[in-house]
Image (cartoon, rainbow, N blue to C red):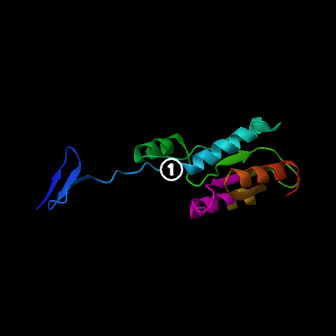
Amino acid sequence: MVRIRKAEKEWAFFGLGQTAAPARAKPVQRERAEQRMLKQWVDLQSWAPLWFHIANERQHQREAWGLKQDGVKPGLPDCVLWLPVGPYSFFACELKATKPHGKSASVEQMRVLEAMRACGAYVCVCFGADEAIAMHRRYAAGEL
């Protein structure tokens, strides 16, 4: 006989004893940790006031609805630096968690990055804070 006690979320299987139901793991927010490391580095740069993070991440459907009502668009890059350098009018970076945890950019993200490139921006997708820092550094130095 299989019996489930809902209040305690325990399962008993044919006299094998009771074991706790598997707990749902909280999602690991690797990308957020990478974003915070990048921001700490940016804060030390002379152009820091021209840099910002677009917070369009969401955890719940209700939060997504609220962000949409506020005008947040899907696919916007994580980081924007309003600093014209060389032939580029600004810098846009989509930050992903380091591999193997980081996923590739979505179709919507790539469409937005291409639209920004058409407007004269230098755009990139970086995996991890170290790669993003290197790209920010190269852009600000005019090496791209």
Residue 106 or residue 24, whichever sits in front: 24
Q: What residue type is labelled 1?
A: Val
* Residue 51 located left or right of residue 112: right
Residue 114 drawn at (x, y percent): 69, 62
The residue positioned farthest toward the front in the image shown: 16
Crowd rating for badge 1 (residues with CA inside 10 Å; few <14, some 14–19, many 20+): few
Relative to 16, residue 136 above or below: above
Magenta span includes 81: no
Image quadrant of residue 52? top right
Residue range in magenta is 93-113
Residue 127 visible, this angle: yes
- Examine the image and state in which quarter residue 12 appears: bottom left
In which quadrant of the rendered view does residue 126 lie?
bottom right
x and y, in percent, of residue 18 in the image: 21, 53
Mark 1 element type: loop
Q: Which residue is drawn at 67% across and 43% down?
A: 37
Q: Does the magenta stretch include residue 99?
A: yes
Q: Residue at x 50, y 50 (%)?
A: 28
Number of dots carrying numbers: 1
Left or right of residue 59: residue 79: right
Q: Quadrant of the C terminus?
A: bottom right
> Quadrant where the N terminus lies?
bottom left
In the rendered image, residue 71, in percent from the top left (x then y), is placed at: 54, 43
Q: Nearer the viewer, residue 105 or 126?
A: 126
Q: Position of residue 68 (x, y in %)?
A: 49, 45
51 horizontally vs 98: left or right: right
**Where does label 1 land, which residue?**
28
